[in-house]
Amino acid sequence: QGGREANQVSDDYRYQDGNYEGYAPNDSYYHGGDEPTHEEDAQSDVTEGHDEDDEVYEGEYQGIPHPDDIKEKQKKRAPAVDDEYRDRADLMAERMEDEEQLAHQYENIIEECGHGRFQWTLFFVLGLALMADGVEVFVVGFVLPSAEKDMCLSSSNKGMLGLIVYLGMMVGAVMLGGLADKLGRKKCLIISLTINAAFAFLSSFVQGYGFFLFCRLISGLGIGGSLPIVFAYFSEFLSREKRGEHLSWLCMFWMIGGIFASAMAWSIIPHYGWGFSMGTKYHFHSWRVFVLVCSLPCIASLVALKFMPESPRFLLEMGKHDEAWMILKQVHDTNMRAKGEPERVFTVSYIKTPKQVDEFIEIQSSTGTWYQRWLVRITTTFKQVWDNVLYCLTAQYRMNTLMLAVVWFTMALSYYGLIVWFPDMIRYLQEEAYESRVKIFDEEEVSHFTFNFTLENQIHRNGEYRNDKFIGMKFKEVKFEDSLFEDCYFEDVTSSETFFENCTIISTVFYNTDLYEHKFINCRFINSTFLKEKEGCHMDFEEDNDFLIYLVSFLGSLSVLPGNIISALLMDKIGRIKMIGGSMLISAVCCFFLFFGNSESAMIGWQCLFCGASIAAWNALDVITVELYPTDKRATAFGILNGLCKFGAILGNSIFASFVGITKVVPILLASSALVGGGLLALRLPETREQVLM
């Protein structure tokens, strides 16, 4: 009996892997192929236990199995306990153990697949999606000067239009980032880009302010969800030694998006004729053409993404072993063919899949109505997303999440605040220079004269105008104070920043002008008539669009190129933490030089220096956020932190813009203090350079 047990243990030990071709796991007999002939049986008896490749056959002595192997086999023989009767903590512990094994195995598989044509193809596809995000940030700022005249926007409406995109991005990052951990990277990225492309395209055609605002909000929601998904998606096709560098190269597409938006604005918006009109109500001006063109990167990425596979790392987390294996084999074969080694075989046959713990309630088609089934699916999915959000605040990740949140927020507050503050300050300096050249006319008397030319940057005080005609002319930055207009005639007059204060207007006719009631402040009208006022707002691109603002944004985007290159080359050499801390502290020093920016050229120079210094911190933040969280929480955590970043951008825009023309001290001190605090705190984060993706 003891001999039989020893033989049985020896057989179990020999075939415990169960992957010898032709053998069943529980017996030791060959089941594949046809029955051998008697002659073949005789030959096999002679050569039993040996062949040319030294393969193991029945009868060969394998030695005494290790006691641990015997215990493991006995454990496998023990009757299994259904998961429903096991404690959830035990299931989670088993899943975490499986995930750790998978993380190291997956790293080896990615190294075997190599880095080649597949990763570079995915790099450009996802780069277009990241480029669309960069474009979205700049679009509203560029069209605002034109849109405010086309839609008659007040100051409060302009402010809301500038912030609404960030609000949509904030919501989209949290919502779609969380869904990407449950529905898949590719699927959610397609949803995100589709929302952005559809509503960005639609916003170029709508005429009303409210509808335009809504379209930009939903467009921002879509593109905001793409950022966390792009980095999570790409990182899961990269090996440890390539991850930091190539994620940093991917960040360059955000810079390319800014350059693309600036160049398109510069080349399209000033061309007023690049549009059409349908009657008197519908106008498609050139700034709408610009909005349309800016949706092209998103559409291109959406089309290309259709040909890319889902992340195999995500599929393994979901227990979809066969689908993940096929994709990894595709990655391997694509790279090997590109390297001229098509004969290389993908040697992986089995990949560890974690224990599935989440309970997804699937209602059969015969149960309830269709909307009840969808309601349960939706509520269950969002409950799982919410559980993921809470998981990022559990003891294991709480400190890392809180420290990253502070670093993301301080970086966004200072960066986005200054990015808005720079153009506003340059515009303020221009206005100061413009006002310094104002012409003042006191007590002038003009009679029987026809004005048919442009009056610009003038102040007329205590003047008298009798029997004068103002025909087919333009007023720009003109103010009449305490003046008299008697028996005058205004026809086809357009005005910008023109006001009449404390004036007396007697027997005067206004025909087809845009001199509306709010432009007359404390004025007295006697027998005067307003006929056929101009409707809507009127645009004059030649005079009202500031080309310097496009140039500033273009140079600011281009200036991050050296920082992108340096961060990509050094990310895996000096580490993520030193990159974040060093970049933020250098950026804080750059802020202090802004005290010396008293001219337009100086402000442009300091802006380029600040953007170039801070981009390395952004790149390192993207990399470390991806690496600190496990696969099933990665996009959720990135979405939460990126949503907080957009909240910091909203606060930065509002706070910094309010100090333009008042003082430079508060914005500079606030930005530098936030950068120093965030940079020092970043040094306490764990280094992830040598870490495999969990």
Image: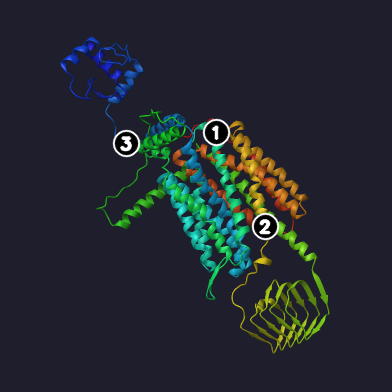
Residue type at mark 2? Ile
Q: Nearer the viewer, residue 60 or 104?
A: 60
Q: Residue 498: percent from the left, percent from the top?
A: 71, 73
Q: Which amino acid is tagged 3? A: Asp
Nearer the viewer's eye, disc 2 or disc 3? 2
Residue projecting furthest to the front: 340
Q: Nearer the viewer, residue 419 or 279?
A: 279
**Residue identifier under label 3:** 83
Task: Tell me how far mark 3 sits from mark 1, CA to CA.
Answer: 34 Å
Neighbour tally class for label 1: few under 14, some 14-19, many 20 plus, Cα within 10 Å: many
Question: In this orientation, does residue 385 appear?
Answer: no
Q: Residue 618's spot in the image, x, y percent? A: 60, 43
Query: Element at badge 1?
Result: loop
Looking at this view, name the residue that lies furthest to the left: 38
Instruction: Say few, some or many: other residues with alpha carbon within 10 Å of mark 3 (under 14 / 14 to 19 / 20 or more).
Output: few
Q: Nearer the viewer, residue 338 or 58?
A: 338
The picture places residue 262, in percent across and down from the top left corner, at 62, 54
Name the residue type under label 1: Thr
> Disc 3 vs disc 1: which is toward the camera?
1
223 in relation to 588, above or below: below
Marked residue nearer the N-terminal end (1 or 2): 2
- Residue drawn at the location 40% of the way across and 46% of the way down: 183
Left or right of 404, for residue 84: left
Q: Which residue is mark 2?
A: 549
Q: Residues within 10 Å of mark 2 (few under 14, many from 20)?
A: some
The percent coordinates of residue 274 (x first, y second) are 57, 65
Q: Residue furthest top?
A: 46
Q: Quadrant of the N terminus?
A: top left
16 and 676: which is toward the camera: 16
Q: Which residue is mark 1?
A: 688
